[in-house]
Image: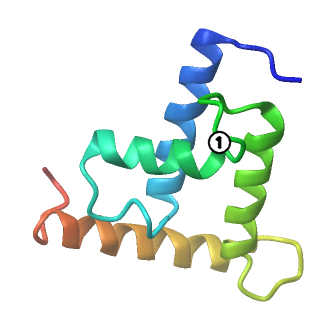
């Protein structure tokens, strides 16, 4: 059973979008900011009730973790995190026409 937390839901959806975009979610790449939020929110809201429960949030983060865990050992190494950061930086740079200072 889901509990509706207006502010909490907004914080979770915003945090999810930031995490997914910064961590390199391909479905958000190139999307307008509002559209990116829609993509992330809809991906996490698996039962389509326009709420992200704590369970759905954790499932979405688990899926993302599994994408980042390149050697599938259940842990993220510093190297995997650095690669993720470099990939996100490259993706952002390409979205901004090669200029990360925008």
The answer to which of 37 and 46 lies nearer the viewer is 46
44 vs 5: above or below: below
Which residue occupies 70% across, 53% down? Answer: 60
Residue 34 percent across, percent down from the top left: 31, 39
Q: Seen from this angle, which residue lies furthest front?
A: 48
- Badge 1 marks a residue whose secondary structure is loop
Q: Is residue 56 left or right of residue 19?
A: right
In which quadrant will I find the N terminus? top right
Which residue occupies 67% across, 74% down? Answer: 67
Q: Residues within 10 Å of mark 1 (few under 14, many from 20)?
A: many
Q: Is residue 2 left or right of residue 63?
A: right
89 vs 41: above or below: below
Residue 100 percent across, percent down from the top left: 19, 60
Q: Is residue 7 left or right of residue 4?
A: left
Numbered-mark total? 1
Which residue occupies 10% across, 69% down? Answer: 97
The answer to which of 19 and 51 lies nearer the viewer is 51
Residue 63 percent across, percent down from the top left: 73, 64
Q: Which residue is mark 1?
A: 45
Residue 59 percent across, percent down from the top left: 79, 52
């Amino acid at each position: 059973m889901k509990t509706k937390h207006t502010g909490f839901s907004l914080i979770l959806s915003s945090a999810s979008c930031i995490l997914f975009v910064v961590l390199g979610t391909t479905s958000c790449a190139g999307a307008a900011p509002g559209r990116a939020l829609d993509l992330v929110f809809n991906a996490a809201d698996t039962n389509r009730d326009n709420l992200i429960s704590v369970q759905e949030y954790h499932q979405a983060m688990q899926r993302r973790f599994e994408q980042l865990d390149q050697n599938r050992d259940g842990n993220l190494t510093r190297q995997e995190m650095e690669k993720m950061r470099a990939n996100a930086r490259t993706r952002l740079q390409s979205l901004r026409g090669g200029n990360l200072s925008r």
